[in-house]
Every structure is written in C-alpha cells, then in structure tokens.
Amino acid sequence: MKTAGVLAAAAAVLPGCGHPFNINTGGLGGKMKLSFRPYELQLAHTFTVSSYSRKTTPGVQLTIDYDGYTGYGEASMPPYLGQSVESVTRFLEKVDLEQFSSPFLMDDILAYVDSLSEGDSAAKAAIDIALHDLVGKLIGQPWYRIWGYDPEKAPDTTFTIGIDTPEVVREKTLECAGRFNILKVKVGLDSDEEMIRSIRSVTQLPLAVDANQGWKDRQKALDEIFWLHEQGVVMVEQPMSVDALDDIAWITERSPVPIFADESVQRLRDVERLRGSFSGINIKLMKCTGMREGHKMVDFARALGMKVMVGCMTETSCAVSAAAQLSPAVDFADLDGNLLITNDLFDGVKVVDGRLRLPDRPGIGLLPL
C-alpha cells in the first residue's frame, strides 16, 4: 500500500507521464528531517550596483533527509531582499515536515510552507530546492528531464560586470571575455557611458545591461537605451523604479531592445499586471519561492506572449543548478552567481564555451565538494 501510494504521488509530479522513470521505492520509511546552517558567501571582487556595494552575501545551507537520500537547498540574501540569516532561521524553525508521509506530496508541502508567512521568499526557496532535489533523486532523473526540457536548448549565460573604475572594469572584462558569449553590465549611475566604453575598449561581445532601478527620467533613460543599442546592447533590465510602471511602459513601447522586469516581478501573481509594461520577466528562485513557482511563471509568461529570463543572486552551485533546470525554456540566462564566489560547496551546472551545460545527475544535479 505504501509503495502504491508513493507511485501515485510520483505520477502527480509527472502529469501525463504515467510511470516512465525508475522511481526508487526503497524502504520509503521514516520522516523527512530538515537541517540548516548559516554559510557566508565570499565574492571574488567587490560587487557594486546602482544602490550598494558588497564583498560578501549572507546565506543559509539546508538539507532534507529521507530514506537514505539527501536533498540540498539554499537561501541567499542580498541586501535588497530585506531578509537575513536571522529571519531565515526564524522561519525554518517553524517548519514541520514530519507531518507529511512522503516527499512526493509536493503541492501540499509547499502550500503549507508558503502559508507560514507572507514573505520569507529565500527561506521558502531553500526548502523548495531541497525538496525538488530529494524527489528528483528518488525518481532518478534531473528536473529538466522530468519537466520535458531538452538540455541542448540551454542558452548562453551572461557574466556580470559590476560598477567600478575604468581600470577595474577593463580588468574584469579581460578575465571573463574569452569564456563567455555575452556579458551583463550593471549601470544606473552617472558613469554608465564610461562603463560601456571601458568594456568596448577590450571586447565587442554582445551586452545586457541592468539599471537596478537606477534611472530616474524616462526620456533620459530612453535616450540612453538607444545609445546602448548602438553599442551592442541586446536587452535592458529594470530601467526605473518599481513605482514607475507607467514610465517603464512608455520606455518599453519605444525601446529598440526588450525591457525585462527584475525588481518589479517577485512571484507568479505579479506577472499578469506587468504585461504591456515590460517585454519579459526575470525569474529568480530567491524571489519567487523556488523551482515550482518558477516553473509556473515560465509557462504563464509564455501564455501571455512575454519573454522569459532566469537569473540568480550570489549563490553556490546549489541554487544556481536548481535555477538552471529551467534554462532550456527561457530566452536569456544570467546564471553566474556561483562563478562570482570563492567558496562554492558543490559541483553542479557548468559553463562550457559560454553556454550552460546541465549535469546528467538526478535532482538538481549536485555533487558536494
């Protein structure tokens, strides 16, 4: 009876697929055990955007153990999320997974987790990622395959150049330009043109730019976007404040390149109201509570005729590899968070000749280092 129940639950995870995979039934005993610990991420370079600089990012590493299998998850909390190790810890201490008989009850488990507070998106994402990793290992397949995605369609990923002096910008660009096919540049200050010219002095690679709400005047922003387009920029993220939606819609209507929402889009409920104001959305697991909602956001944005990007915070290969499971279904990927740190804990998704290469390992594809 227990095995039959688990197989039925697995079929619910894989709608319309019956039982095509080698689902591990094992002993299928015991309860799920949740464990977590703080882990501070060390950046290789000081990271500067239009509103702050930092050299570290606070994080929490999480595991869910069940029947001899371990699922790995992660919460990462850059300043703008408004979350901390303390808030994540307080949230996780409230979570009781032992009330659920099987990790395959993913809808019930994640609905319960989401109901525990209004916010705490990073803590919820950590549980979601670990649960997906665990269930993928029990099924014996990576999530891109469970979702029916072709890993060969995974796109190039951008590599981010933060705001800095011309000398440092050129140095950072030279370090990475030979390994990537597209770079991402942080803008939004008076030094924007200097930043772009510094990069163009050493490479002609296509560029994406992220203003992080830094531009204040819509006409000036649009003029800059036209100039950026002439410099080989192919997309722009979050040109103005989340409160300036009418101005952003005005820019999007006139822009020669697609305009993507970043800070303006957090969760699934935000997507529909942004149609017409942005060309597309940037999905980040730490904002949307994890892989399950991220997957729904991809499908919903596509149904609305919007473009889709998948991004990340500063993260280990745990959360980046989780986000990468969605990458074959998107237009742009910005999954370099693990490449910006010096203390990664896992072997996971790789970048080969600038493109994402998804590991053929179950779950989210990790090997602990």
Image (spheres, rainbow, N blue to C red):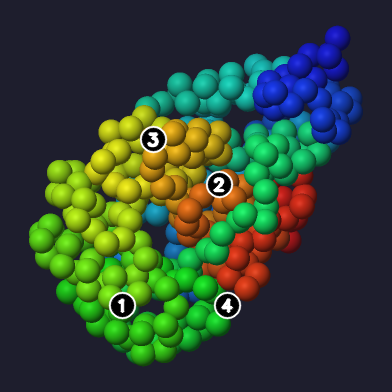
Q: Mark 1 touching mark 2, by CB under 8 A? A: no
Residue 25: percent from left, percent from top: 86, 26
Q: Residues within 10 Å of mark 4 (few under 14, many from 20)?
A: some
Q: Residues within 10 Å of mark 1 (few under 14, many from 20)?
A: some
Figure quadrant of the C terminus: bottom right
The numbered mark, 1 or 2, whose residue comes first in the sequence reads 1
Judged from the image, the secondary structure of the residue bearing numbered disc 1 is: loop
Quarter of the image for residue 287 reads: top left
Amino acid beneath label 1: Gln
Is residue 359 visible to the viewer in this orientation of the structure? yes
Q: Give how far apart the Cα atoms at labels 2 and 4 are.
A: 23 Å
Residue 241: percent from left, percent from top: 20, 51
Between label 3 and label 4, give the one nearer the viewer: 3
Judged from the image, the secondary structure of the residue bearing numbered disc 2 is: helix
Amino acid beneath label 3: Leu
Is residue 84 visible to the viewer in this orientation of the structure? no
Relative side of 190 to 229, left or right: left
Q: Which residue is mark 3?
A: 304
Judged from the image, the secondary structure of the residue bearing numbered disc 4 is: loop
Q: Give how far apart the Cα atoms at labels 3 and 4 are.
A: 34 Å
The numbered mark, 3 or 4, whose residue comes first in the sequence reads 4
Relative side of 152 to 285, left or right: right
Q: Give how far apart the Cα atoms at labels 4 and 1 are.
A: 20 Å
Residue 329's label in the rendered image is 2
